[in-house]
Image: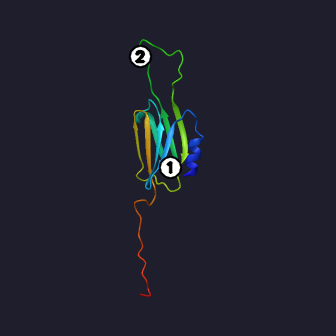
Amino acid sequence: MSALRDALRDLSEDVFFDLLESEDAYLLVLDVPGVTAESLDLAIEDGRISIDATREKEPTEDYQYIEENRSLFLDVDLPLPDDASDANAEATVDRGVLELVLPKRGSSDETTIEIVDEDA
């Protein structure tokens, strides 16, 4: 997971995120103000997490932009943690907050192996 943590630290200081971990999964919470599910592309491929987000906004009919400082174009490529699985990953975006849950491999498929004492 340190590669993901390092990549997140290298993002612009304008990008706000939290990275959490449980026994079963990682949770990446990323602020993407003004972004909807339709203006967000998220993919996990070849051990990489790709996030492309755009804030879409239109001024009202009576106004036009003189200066725009609130644009959001986020295009990040992050490493998937070594013990994370893209299978059953889940993502939601609500009120400008993206939550990506990455299950850990084998967390729910643990196998207990019985040890037989041959001397008994």
- 96 versus 9 height, above or below: above
Q: Which callout, 2 or 1, points at the residue further toward the start of the chain?
A: 1
- 22 versus 18 height, above or below: below
Q: Element type at marker 2? A: loop
Q: Element type at marker 1? A: strand
Q: Quadrant of the C terminus?
A: bottom left
Position of 67 compared to 94: left or right? right
Position of 118 compared to 66: left or right? left
Residue 84 visible in the snapshot: yes
Task: Place residue 108 in its image quadrant.
Answer: bottom left
Q: Which residue is the extreme one toward the bottom?
A: 119
Residue in the image at 52% along x and 31% along y: 73
- 53 versus 119 height, above or below: above
The disc label shown at residue 60, or none: 2
Give the percent coordinates (x, y) of residue 28.
Answer: 47, 44
Give the percent coordinates (x, y) of residue 63.
Answer: 45, 13
Give the percent coordinates (x, y) of residue 30.
Answer: 48, 39
Task: Place residue 115 in its image quadrant.
Answer: bottom left
The disc label shown at residue 45, or none: 1
Q: Amino acid at mark 2?
A: Thr
The alpha-carbon separation of the residues under discs 2 and 1 comes to: 39 Å
**Nearer the observer, disc 2 or disc 1?**
2
Dot 2 alpha-carbon crowd within 10 angstroms: few under 14, some 14 to 19, many 20 or more: few
Q: Amino acid at mark 1?
A: Glu
Residue 46 visible in the snapshot: no
Q: Which residue is the extreme one toward the top?
A: 62
The disc label shown at residue 14, or none: none
